[in-house]
Image (spheres, grey):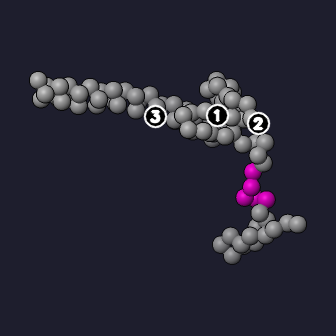
Amino acid sequence: MLMVMKLNGVAAPDSLFTKSVADTIQIERGGSYYYKGEALSMESLRTILKKDSIANGHLDNATVSKVFSIIFGGIGGFLVGYEAGANLS
């Protein structure tokens, strides 16, 4: 049975809003990725996402953001720790 949903007054079959479980990459806390029940490394995830230019772009942006957050987090942590250490001594 095909279910129909109304989206902004237009009838659309619910198959437009679902994705096959087999096509889904599951993401768990801590940065673990699973595809079809198999754990993926970052290299294999990048290989899979190369087929989709939008997803590959998001992965590239996330990688750049991670690098900047590590750099700025380290600098900020040093500055706060240095100031706290100076005040305590």
Viewer-nearest residue: 89 or 69: 89
At which x and y percent is residue 11?
Answer: 75, 72
The answer to whether marks 2 and 1 mark residues whose Cβ atoms lie closer than 8 Å is no
Image quarter (top left, top right, bottom left or bottom right) of the N terminus: bottom right
Q: Is residue 8 magenta?
A: no
Q: Residue furthest bottom?
A: 9
Q: Judge the density around disc 3: few (<14), some (14-19), many (≥20) Cα neighbours within 10 Å.
A: few
Q: Could you tell me the amino acid type at mark 1? A: Tyr
Q: Which residues are magenta?
A: 15-19
Q: CA distance from mark 2 to mark 1?
A: 10 Å
Image position, residue 48 (x, y; %): 71, 31
Disc 2 crowd rating (10 Å Cα; few below 14, some 14-19, many 20+) is few
- The residue indicated by pointer 3 is 65
Q: Measuring 76% from the left and 67% from the top, which residue is drawn there?
A: 12
Tell me the kind of residue under disc 3.
Answer: Ser
Whole-angstrom CA distance, mark 3 to mark 1, is 19 Å
Question: What residue sits 79% from the left and 59% below the top?
Answer: 15
Q: Which mark is residue 36?
A: 2
Which mark is drawn over residue 69? none
Q: Secondary structure at mark 1?
A: strand
Q: Is residue 51 visible?
A: no
Residue 37 drawn at (x, y percent): 74, 35
Mark carried by residue 33? 1
Quadrant showing the C terminus: top left
Q: Position of 20 compared to 71: left or right?
A: right
